[in-house]
Each structure stands twice: as structure tokens, then as C-alpha cells.
Image (cartoon, grey):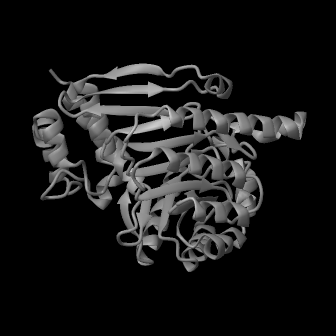
Amino acid sequence: MSLYFHIPFCAGSCAYCDFYSIDLSDLSARSKTAVNTTLDRYGEALERDLARLPENLVIPTVYLGGGTPSVLGAPRIGRLLSALRGVLRNRPAEITVEANPESVTEPFLRVCRETGVTRVSLGIQTFHEPSRKAVGRTGSADNNALSLVREYFGGAFSVDLMTGLPLQDERVLLRDIEQIVSRGPEHISLYALTAEHGSPLEKRLPDPDAADALWIRGRDALRDNGYEQYEVSNFSLPGKQSAHNIRYWRMESWIGLGAAASSTLIDEETGSAARFTFAPDIDAFIRGEPPDFEALDRNTLIKETVLMGFRYRAGPDAARFHRRFGVRIEDIIPRTLAAWREKGLLEPEKPALTEAGLLFLNRFLRDAFTEIDRP
């Protein structure tokens, strides 16, 4: 099982974010002591739950996400990762820590390197300051963070970019990509910004057709620079994909620790799963309140496996699907696969969307779920 730590703290609130997170500027308005106390107690709670995991677990990948894990600071990150090394009997092949440019420091990067982190993921989104300010991004996304990562970390690093931002056009996006590519990240995520319908932010975004065209232009620029699209929004140099995220897209088991984190434990023999989700409440997590439980029956797990698997450029793991459910993907959604293959949007030799087909993923999933639910 992979392991995910949710660090739900940010230096500020972005207008587009719908993840559970705590704006540290609200806490610091009370006192700096309140911030440090909260972060200390949260880190201790993560270590507490980490120590409760079953013995002899083999954890292939670890991911510290958020929020912004780097706002914990070097000492707390170091303690958590040291505690992780103390409970595992294997060395994970991949340990990723997310960070925002403004909280990337030399001590933070040194701790990452010394505690076995293999990848740092930088949430840059854009270097274009008017666009950053328009969505409430804190700090300044300059190239200094990229230089620090190369100098003091030395391992692989990933960058998040976003399209469809206010005041962003093709020139801005291509300049962002040029600056990023020049630093040689192994992995780049290119996300299309969406906003809640009717929200003030939605009114500031480009026309949907223009936004779609801009994302496609970004995709093509990444491809021209040697980055392969291996998932809807993820690109990498050959062989440098995110192993942790691939496990999600293949619906393999994972454990989530932290407020709002969820675990999904799959029973391969019955084709069902158990899901445990902590409340989106840091105080409840610190107190040790148990997560909520949800049973995923066979039909629900089939849908989730299809949902996640067709995001992946290679498609769902066909052999695993057959072992897990006793049927082939082709037996579950034959009409959907045939129709999309006829359109040229499905690969001819396997159940996987083509590059063009990925642009219509939601429509494909709607067709697939309708067929799964049909008596």
C-alpha cells in the first residue's frame, strides 16, 4: 500500500482551491505562537498515527501533499520523515514532497535530501504576476526556487503549471513553459483552471473554448520539448512518471493520514474495498478522532477503476481488472468501447483513450457509467 500524508496548511488562500486547507495568515493574525503550536501538534498527530500502522508494511511510494507541506518547515518535515523511516521495513522507491516557491529554502531542501525524498513537486502555476495576483497566489514565483532545488536537493523535481488563468494568453503560457523547460524538470503537470459556476472568479476566466485551446497549445509545447503525456494532466520525460500517482490511476491500495485524508484498501479476492476518511478538521485529527468508514461494493469499485484507469494514457490495468472482478473491461462496457473506437478516440489494440480521446474523458465516462448501470 502506498502512503499519503495530507498537510492542510497554506501561506494564503487561492481563489480557485476547493481542497480542505487552513490559511496560516489567519492564525498568524492571532499570534506567531498559535501557528507554531498548531503545526507542532499536527506533526505530532501524524507521527502518532504513523506509529499505529501494522508492522512489516511494504510501502512502495510516499507522498506529502496538501495544502503546502513545505510550510511545516525543515525541522518538522525532518521529524516526520525520520519517523517514517523508523516504521518501514523497506525503502520506498519514490518519496515526493509538494512545495510552493515562497517556502522553498536551503534547510528544507537539505532535509528532503538527507531523509530520502526522491522528488520535490513545485506548485509554480505561472510566473506571470498579474495572473498570480488575480487568483490570490501568495509570494512570487521567480526562478530562484528552481535554482535552489537544483543546487541543494539534487534529486528529481516536478512543476505544476496552470492554464485558463485570468490575464493569461498564449504568449504568457509559452514563456512560462520555456522558463520551466530550461531548468530541466523530469515531470510537469499542466492543469486547466476551473471555477465554481457563478463564482466571482468564473467571471474573470477566459471563454471556455479559448481556455481549452490554450491548454492544448500548452500540451503541444510540452510534447515538442520531449515531455510525454501519460495522464490527462501529467507529462514527463521518458521513464520519469510519478509512480505514486500511477498507483491511484490503477486503483491500487493506499493509506491516507491527516485531516481530510482518505484510505482505500482493496480486497482483490472479492472485488470490493473499504474506505476510511478523516474529517476535514485539524482539531479532530489532533484529538485522534477515528475516520469515517465506507464500504465500496463490486459495482462501485468497478466504476472507480474505470474512472481512474481511463485518465491514464495506457488505460486501466487489464490483467489486474480481470483478476479483481473476474471479467474483462471489454465485457463490462463493450458498446462504449466499440462506439469510441469507431470514432477514432480509442486505441485499436487496447481499452485506452487516444490523445484526442482524453480531451473528451468526461463524455466517455458518462457513456461508460450509463452502460455499467444499465440492467
Instruction: Assign the N terminus to one quadrant of the image.
Output: top left
Instruction: Assign the C terminus to one quadrant of the image.
Output: top left
The reply, left or right, for residue 137 in relation to residue 319 is right
Along the line of sight, the residue nearer the viewer: 231 or 166: 231
The reply, left or right, for residue 367 in relation to residue 174 is left
The reply, left or right, for residue 328 in relation to residue 292 is left
| Residue at x 58% of width, y 19% of height | 289
Q: Position of residue 87 (x, y in %)?
A: 48, 43
| Residue at x 26% of width, y 22% of height | 297
Res 357 visible? yes
Q: Position of residue 357 (x, y in %)?
A: 29, 54
| Residue at x 61% of width, y 72% of height | 171
Along the line of sight, the residue nearer the viewer: 223 or 283: 283
Res 160 visible? no
164 is higher (above) or lower (below) than 321: below
Q: Quadrant of residue 280?
A: top right
Total residue callouts: 0
Q: Quadrant of residue 300?
A: top left
The reply, left or right, for residue 256 in relation to residue 65 is left
Q: Position of residue 240 (x, y in %)?
A: 40, 67
Along the line of sight, the residue nearer the viewer: 78 or 169: 78
| Residue at x 24% of width, y 36% of height | 368
Along the line of sight, the residue nearer the viewer: 89 or 358: 89
Q: Position of residue 98 (x, y in %)?
A: 59, 54
